[in-house]
Amino acid sequence: SDGTLRVLEDNTRMPSGLAYAIAARRALDAELAAPVPAGRLDVTGAYPVLRRALFASAPDGVDDPHVVLLSDGPANSAWHEHEQMGAEMGVTVVTRDELSVRAGRVHARPEGGSDRIVDVLYRRTYEDRLRDEEGRPTWFADLVLDPIRRGTLTVVNRPGAGLADDKLVHAYVEEMVRFHLGEEPLLPSVRTYDLGDADQLAEALERLGDLVVKPRDGYGGAGVVVCRFATAEDRRAVTRKVRDDPDSYIAQETVMLSTHPTVIEGRLEPRHVDLRPFVLGGGDSSTAVPGALTRVAFGAGELVVNSSRNGGGKDTWVMG
């Protein structure tokens, strides 16, 4: 790392990790022998901020909204986070089988609970599409589209927010900032190649061995190939994929992530880390969470820090 903070990508559909940041803080504080510096901000303050944002997003005319968190249940890798967030914010966690639509309103009947109308649905499911590969409405569309159109339901984050999750969009974020705000980005982005552009594709193919190739719609580190450290067979395979279907991939400059001392089998060793901050927006304002999740790759030299690829998390202190 050269010491410059750079943005790798944006997560706007259902960004995860907030509960893990708080869990890391609590785990560290339980073992920390030294006194905590007075200026350290309390990351658990994120829950009240998120709760206020959810309640403030209620449909017009609803002063005391019923908010639920929609999860896939234990099958979702973030199920623990969903349960913790629901408990901390005082909102009910439900699965699709506990929801129904009647007369343009979403109803929730959790196990052992009573039937209640849902005003705000915080979506944390794998399914976020409105139509499947064959163009048919998904169960999610059947659940939310009519209530959204009638103005009886707010979905957070709304359908369409995933547009910014498309890794190709990140190639143009700096240009968006200049065009819409008339200023230079405060945080530079990692250079991202739009492989659907013939010139950028040709340039990327010439130096693919120095780049990282990612599926545009991938998440959790799935399908990511760090070509510099990949086997010759993997490099040939990803080159074929890019040549055959360039519109489905992006390429980025390889960023040698910063390292941080990490306890490995009782010893301190350097391991690569990245930073996932959280910003909660609603209306015309946004609030940065007073903390963040530092993700760590436990394998020596490993650059993929995602928890689904055996990565972990570290407590992150924000001083104020």
Image: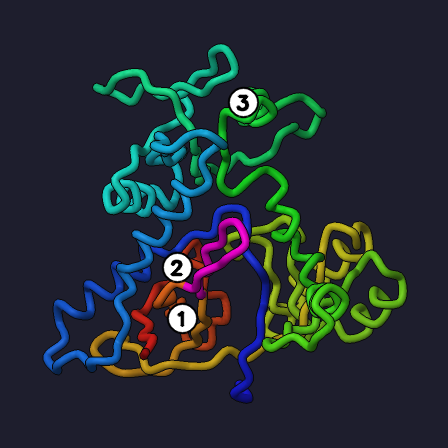
Query: What residue does disc 1 label?
Result: 299
State the residue at coordinates (37%, 69%): 298
Q: Which amino acid does label 2 sit on?
A: Asn
Residue 160 pos. (x, y %): 63, 41
Query: What residue does disc 2 label?
Result: 310
* Nearest the eye: 41 or 31: 41
Label 1 and label 3: CA atoms lie apart by 47 Å
Residue 199 pos. (x, y %): 89, 67
Say which quadrant the C terminus sits in: bottom left
Q: Which amino acid does label 3 sit on?
A: Pro
Label 1 and label 2: CA atoms lie apart by 9 Å
Q: Which of marks 1 and 3 is in front?
A: 3
State the residue at coordinates (10%, 79%): 33
Q: In this view, does 49 lie above or below 153?
A: below
* Nearest the eye: 94 or 312: 94
Task: Specify the label residue 147 is tagged with.
Answer: 3
The outermost residue toward the left is: 33
**Considering only order in the chain, which callout, 3 or 2, is on the residue closer to the N terminus?**
3
Question: Which SS class for mark 2?
Answer: loop
State the residue at coordinates (39%, 69%): 294
